Image (cartoon, helix red, strand yellow):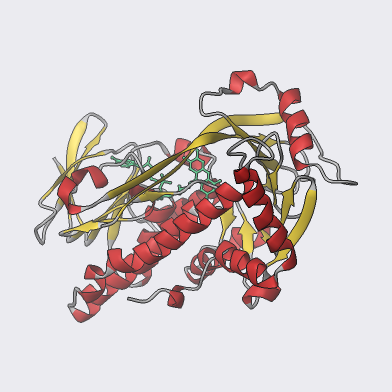
Amino acid sequence: MKIIKTQVGIIGAGPAGLTLAHWLKQKGISSVILENRSQEYVQARVRAGLLEQNTVDILDNLGLADRLKKEGQEHHGVYLNFDGQRIRVPFGELTGGRNITIYGQQEVVKDLTEAWQEAGETLLFETPAIELEGIETGSPKIHFEQEGGRGMVECDFIAACDGFHGLGRKSMPKDSYKEYEVTYPFSWLGILANVAPSSEELIYAYHENGFALHSLRSETISRLYIQVDNEDSVENWPDEKIWEELSIRLGTKGWKLNSGPIFEKSITPMRSYFIDNMQFGNLFLAGDAAHIVPPTGGKGLNLAIADVKHLVDGFEDFYQNNSRKELDNYSKIALKRIWRAQDFSNFMTTLFHKQDEHGSFQYQLQKAKFDYISISDSYKTTIAENYVGLPFDTFMV
Ligand SMILES: Cc1cc2nc3c(=O)[nH]c(=O)nc-3n(C[C@H](O)[C@H](O)[C@H](O)COP(=O)(O)OP(=O)(O)OC[C@H]3O[C@@H](n4cnc5c(N)ncnc54)[C@H](O)[C@@H]3O)c2cc1C
């Protein structure tokens, strides 16, 4: 049986696992990564694309942002539409110069994977973790499968960065955490299209037909979404129908939506889920393994990287000072940001989605909120600072 010894055994080569591995290396702490899927699959998986200021700064400080800086697009504001009226929330002037950057999650994963491999470090693809042993002891083990054989990672700590369906959360005793779950009564139909974006910044829109979002991936690729029913399927949405609906929902006077060939189409359910404890013994969860938010507001990937920051603080404290203080505080400090993100994602979701009849009491509340945002700099500031991500020193325990 193949046996690998390291300080931190990481499950999952998504944004959380890869960032953790690089950051631990910078601190002189060894780790290995096990990944269920193939390298090709992981690097082609289209998901998030909005990086908060904190995320960009972290990748930059790790020396992993060369391509991101060249190809990513920094955005200094966001447009909000309601019933065809458009306003802009500027970021920099309301947040002391903080902004967001548009750069695909799969590009982040590609950059971090290649840098890890070039450094000669261990990342085993197509190697699922199948069982965790001794998580309450000082020498936990990850059992894995590879090419029909079995192996084991012997480590001091296990970091489960293995996403929502991963093994980490399932390995924690059920009575060690409380679960929170909300399923929204709508989903997003998302497309990627080979067409220049129709706006240099994102547009979130409420329309009586439902929500729409105009986003982008590059100067030649647009990313757009529309609200659909949970039971809907992509077969009901031929390309012309999607463009027509986007044009109606995002429309304002004098603005035109560019359309072009669609090369990716999928439906994503809108859910909030999280548990109120992200550690048990020497097993720590980070990212989607412990929480998911609806994508309105773009918090998923950024929360995963924020967890990693607190986890690195904990491991550094342990290996440098022989103290568990920071590690024992990990859940508490991470959850402060997670609750904030859950609230902001819920705010953006309920403000822009059609939840009841157009003109209903619920609609009037949404409209009153939008009208207030349009006249209040304080309200715009609240949105801007949550959108670009609050600095780490905002959350203390
Ligand atoms: C379809 C979709 C669309 C999304 N769109 C957006 C968006 O527009 N904006 C936004 O902010 N967020 C979005 N998200 C959320 C965002 O992509 C996630 O929050 C982000 O991927 C979290 O990173 P992570 O590293 O925690 O988990 P993941 O990226 O899920 O990585 C976990 C990794 O662990 C691996 N793994 C799982 N089990 C095992 C095992 N047993 N052994 C070894 N490896 C394992 C998985 O293969 C995976 O590579 C989207 C998510 C999905 C699913």
Where ligand 1 lies, by image quadrant?
A: top left
- Asked if 43 appears above or below 71 in the picture, the reply is above
User: Which quadrant of the rendered structure holds the C terminus?
Assistant: bottom left
Farthest-out residue, front: 361
Image quadrant in which you'd find residue 91: bottom right
Image quadrant in which you'd find residue 339: bottom left
Residue drawn at (30%, 67%) of the image: 332
Residue 173 showing in the rendered view: no
- Residue 231: percent from left, percent from top: 51, 24
Residue drawn at (73%, 24%) of the image: 241
Name the side, left or right, on which 296 lies relative to 261: left
- Residue 364: percent from left, percent from top: 66, 48
- Residue 17: percent from left, percent from top: 37, 54
250 or 119, which is in the foreground?
A: 250
Name the side, left or right, on which 44 lies relative to 192: left
- Asked if 179 appears above or below 240 in the picture, the reply is below
- Residue 66: percent from left, percent from top: 59, 63
User: Which quadrant of the rendered structure holds the N terminus?
Assistant: top left
92 or 32, which is in the foreground?
A: 92
334 or 120, which is in the foreground?
A: 334
